[in-house]
Image (cartoon, rainbow, N blue to C red):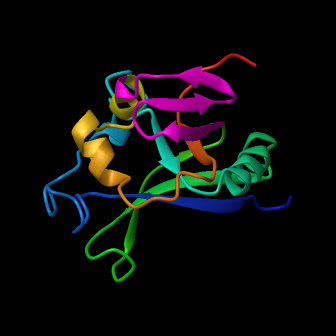
Amino acid sequence: MKEKKTIVLTVSKVFPKTHPKAGNTTGFVESLCMLFTGNNTKIHTIRGNYELWRKRAEKINSGEAILSIRYWSGKPYNSKQVEICRLEKIGVEKILFDDYLYGFKINEQQFSNISEVAENDGLTNNDFEHWFKGYDFSKPMAIIHFTNFRYTQP
């Protein structure tokens, strides 16, 4: 039997240096630990490179791969990764910002309020805005869903 490929997704345990809350706990790890209890506040994460994550989701959902969600035990990229959970099914939606925070599309459907997206990402609007400061919003990003929740219907 062929062993499944492991695709790693790391989440931050603390806010990055560029964020006003730098060094404070994000709560992502704790929320993801509760992923299967229904009490979690982080049901997805947003990453750049939509096409890469779309292809990865296809491999995970077809049974060829598994998603390992991890966090850094210390300094990012210079410490051991600790696994939170493994997922065999994920969802991916394309998000494209027209007017950052005030106009965006998810799978080509227009939205105007980022609050729900920020909350489902485990952040306040203000934290969300600072988290993504400096990103290139001209390129589609991926909403990687850890649950069955989706913003749009196929």
Residue situated in front as seen by the camera: 38 or 102: 102
Whether residue 149 can be seen here: no
Q: Is residue 104 left or right of residue 115?
A: right
Give the residue furthest to the right: 1
Residue 112 drawn in magenta: yes
Q: Specify whether 151 is left or right of 82.
A: right
Give the answer, above or below, for where 68 lies relative to 30.
Answer: below
Question: Residue 16: x and y, percent?
Answer: 26, 64
Principal secondary structure, stretch drawn in magenta: strand
Q: Which of 98 and 50 is in front in this view?
A: 98
Q: Which of 1 and 130 is in front in this view?
A: 130
Q: Give the range drawn in magenta.
A: 90-115
Q: Which residue is pictured at 67% across the width and 52% down the height?
A: 53
Identity of the residue drawn at 25% across and 73% down: 74
Q: Give the residue at the far bottom of this rendering.
A: 78
In the rendered image, the vertical position of residue 15 relative to residue 94, given as above or below: below
Q: From the image, which quarter does the N terminus lie in?
A: bottom right
Residue displayed at 15% across by 57% down = 20
Quarter occupied by residue 100: top left
Q: In which quarter of the image is residue 49?
A: bottom right
In the current view of this chain or complex, which residue is farthest to the front?
99
Residue 37: x, y in percent? 37, 24
Q: Nearer the viewer, residue 115 or 41?
A: 115
- Asked if the magenta segment contains residue 42, the reply would be no
Q: In this view, does 22 lie above or below 65?
A: below
Quarter occupied by residue 7: bottom right
How far from the left and from the top, in percent, is residue 139? Answer: 63, 53
Would residue 132 be visible to someone looking at this image?
yes
